[in-house]
């Protein structure tokens, strides 16, 4: 991810929409206590990026009249200085609710780390003890893989690489001008009550996973409003999925699943052009590929990404952008998070109305879609590269994605 920061800030945003009015002073004190409680622990444990000298600033107060999506857009595009605290907190007052959130350098950790920071902040603001954390392997993470499967993962990745390369040769690509501007536009929507439960029932009836439905909705929405139209020799669509491997790596390292650090896998799904408009055929095609990926060691699917990261050490920034555009023809990516933190679930509904995330696209994809489920609430974040989709088109794409989810339910 440090390599990707050479191209554009690689940040992410996590936020909670909370019932009730904003108490800025109380939240500022709780934020100071949160950092005072967790930063020294992470420094002592030797995690990088926490040896900053300056005192972290208090949370930014976003004016009530300012659009939250525009503020998140700014945070996704605003770089962090290497010597600064890797978190920027913010609060935003609304009519009957308020939002607390953090923007952070993604290289310090993934969603589990950000969720832990948010939980500490919220619970401290409520005068509750936030110190209880799940033991390694809990929190819904997958079990550790057998050693022999982990050892074979690189070999399997090499063996499967030619098949993957042949399939993505038929996938549509970004246009050259998209390399120049990597800045993002962010929009989000909160699903109607009951939609996530209906999607779970729909997935169960079809014998697929909810993430398969998210991928199908993304394919059909991008077919209408996406950044990469089909081309005669490249009619198919490639979608990416981020896989959480934190439980496996945490067990191996003896750490909790919320420790800083990145433990993510990556795999791709190719949607044939003739199946995109046929919903059931599309879902079956996606589900078959997803099931195959889940049976494999997920890190074997990340071989090309590792090659790209190695290549980035010897390539210029301009050549690096070109490499990703040509070798990773990914129209959109899904980073799907199910928040199963017991302390947060106990506050939804009643206190927490929604968990909102903004993901970064990086140089790999043009659109990053971040569904986040907390209890009965589902929020969808969508970040799109501004050189490929303007604000109006981004909003159309998000509405189309939400409409497709409703139809699939």
Image (cartoon, helix red, strand yellow):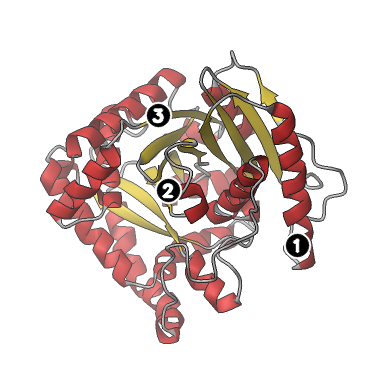
On screen, residue 170 versus residue 113, left or right, reads left
Measure how far apart labels 2 and 3 are at the Cα level.
15 Å
Q: Earlier in the sequence, mark 3 or mark 1?
A: 1
Residue 120's spot in the image, x, y percent?
Answer: 64, 49
Q: In this rendered view, identify the residue nearer to me: 244 or 194.
A: 194
The local secondary structure at tag 2 comes to: loop
**Residue placed under numbered mark 3 in the picture:** 189
Residue 289's spot in the image, x, y percent?
Answer: 24, 60
Within-10-Å neighbours for mark 1: few <14, some 14–19, many 20+? few
**Residue placed under numbered mark 2 in the picture:** 335
- Depth check, mark 3 against mark 1: the one in front is 1
Residue 354 visible within the image: yes
Q: How many marks?
A: 3
Within-10-Å neighbours for mark 3: few <14, some 14–19, many 20+? some
Q: Earlier in the sequence, mark 2 or mark 3?
A: 3
Measure how far apart labels 2 and 1 are at the Cα level.
28 Å
């Amino acid at each position: 991810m440090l390599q990707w920061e050479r191209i554009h800030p690689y940040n992410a945003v996590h936020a909670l929409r909370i019932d009730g009015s904003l108490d800025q002073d109380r939240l500022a004190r709780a934020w100071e206590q949160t950092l005072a409680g967790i930063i020294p622990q992470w420094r002592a444990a030797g995690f990088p990026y926490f040896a900053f000298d300056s005192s972290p600033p208090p949370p930014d107060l976003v004016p009530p009249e300012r659009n939250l999506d525009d503020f998140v857009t700014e945070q996704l595009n605003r770089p962090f200085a290497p010597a600064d605290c890797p978190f920027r907190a913010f609060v935003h007052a609304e009519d009957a609710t308020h939002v607390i959130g953090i923007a952070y350098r993604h290289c310090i950790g993934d969603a589990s780390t950000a969720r832990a920071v948010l939980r500490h902040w919220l619970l401290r603001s409520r005068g509750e003890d936030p110190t209880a954390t799940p033991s390694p392997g809990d929190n819904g993470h997958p079990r550790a893989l057998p050693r022999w499967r982990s050892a074979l993962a690189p070999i399997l990745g090499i063996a499967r690489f030619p098949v993957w390369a042949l399939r993505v040769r038929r996938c549509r690509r970004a246009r050259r001008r998209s390399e120049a501007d990597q800045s993002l536009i962010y929009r989000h929507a909160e699903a109607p009550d009951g939609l996530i439960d209906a999607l779970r029932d729909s997935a169960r009836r079809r014998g697929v996973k909810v993430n398969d439905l998210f991928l199908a909705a993304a394919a059909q929405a991008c077919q209408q409003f996406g950044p990469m139209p089909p081309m005669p020799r490249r009619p198919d669509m490639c979608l990416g999925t981020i896989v959480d491997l934190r439980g496996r790596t945490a067990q191996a390292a003896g750490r909790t699943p919320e420790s800083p650090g990145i433990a993510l896998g990556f795999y791709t799904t190719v949607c044939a052009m003739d199946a995109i408009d046929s919903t059931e055929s599309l879902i079956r095609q996606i589900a078959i590929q997803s099931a195959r990926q889940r049976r494999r060691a997920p890190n074997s699917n990340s071989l090309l990404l590792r090659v790209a990261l190695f290549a980035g050490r010897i390539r210029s920034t301009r050549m690096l952008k070109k490499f990703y555009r040509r070798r990773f023809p990914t129209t959109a990516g899904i980073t799907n998070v199910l928040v199963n933190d017991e302390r947060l679930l106990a506050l939804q509904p009643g206190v927490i109305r929604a968990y909102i995330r903004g993901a970064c696209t990086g140089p790999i994809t043009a659109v990053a879609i971040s569904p986040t489920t907390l209890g009965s609430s589902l929020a969808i974040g969508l970040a799109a590269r501004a050189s490929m989709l303007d604000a109006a088109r981004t909003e159309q794409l998000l509405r189309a994605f939400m409409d497709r989810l409703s139809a699939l339910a």
